[in-house]
Amino acid sequence: MTSKSEKFGFALGKAFKSVIAAAKEPPTPPRQTTTPGAPPMYRTNIRNVETVDGLRREDGWVDMQVQFLVDKKSAGANHVVGRTVLKPGARHERHRHHNCDEFFIVIKGRGHIYSDLGEEPSVEGDVVYSPRGCWHGFNNTSNEDVVLVWGWMGAGSIEDSGYEVDPASRKD
């Protein structure tokens, strides 16, 4: 007779194997589905989204790998959902958006958040919300990659966001 913990362990092992198998499958291609009378749903996969070209160091984007997963261009959205990888030493200088709010979640790693209070430590699991006009940024001060998932509410592109880098914050 098997115990409840043995059954649970078997079920958990089976579920884990299916998750691993799914991770090995090719990424889902971008697509839009439609339901009569409703706007189309947009779906993509992180592995299918190119990093953004043209983000300049002098505009506060220092050695960052940025992806716009959902935005005006890809999905016709009035917001952006993005993913950023900051290698050790990479940072997003102190900046603000005049036309949108921003949030980010530290999915992996640690570093420092730029705020009105200066630099504050930040760790995996932190959720940060910056209302429009609020200075903010992130500096990877660790020896490991930092992965952020972030979003702009109220703007579907950099141009629409009213992006402004703080000239006093530039370190280069």
Image (cartoon, grey):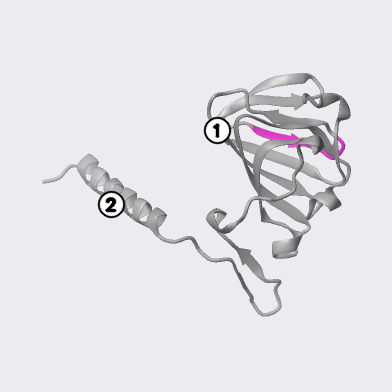
Badge 2 amino acid? Lys
The residue type indicated by label 1 comes to Asp
Q: Quadrant of residue 142?
A: top right
Residue 130 is a magenta residue:
yes
- The answer to whether 32 is drawn above or below residue 9 in the figure is below
Q: Residue 12, labelled with which disc?
A: none
Q: Badge 1: few (under 14), some or many (20 or more) residues near its Cα, within 10 Å?
A: some
Q: Which residues are magenta?
A: 127-133
Q: Is residue 67 left or right of residue 48?
A: right
Q: Where does residue 84 sit, x and y in percent of width and height?
A: 63, 42
Residue 121 appears left or right of 98: left
Q: Within 10 Å of the Cα at label 2, are there few (<14), some (14-19), or many (20+) other Cα atoms?
A: few
- Mark 1 and mark 2: Cα distance apart in space: 31 Å
Residue that carries the numbered disc 2 in the rendered image: 14
Label annotation for residue 145: 1
Q: Residue furthest left?
A: 1
Asked if the magenta segment contains residue 142, the reply would be no
Identify which residue, 66 or 110, lies in the foreground: 66
Q: Secondary structure at mark 2?
A: helix
The location of residue 39, given as percent across then percent down, is 71, 71
Residue occupying image coordinates x 67% and y 43%: 150
Label 1 secondary element: loop
Asked which quadrant contains residue 86, the reply is: top right
Q: Position of residue 167 (x, y in %)?
A: 87, 29
- Residue shown at 54% from the left, 24% from the top: 143
Out of 113 and 1, give the one closest to the viewer. Answer: 113
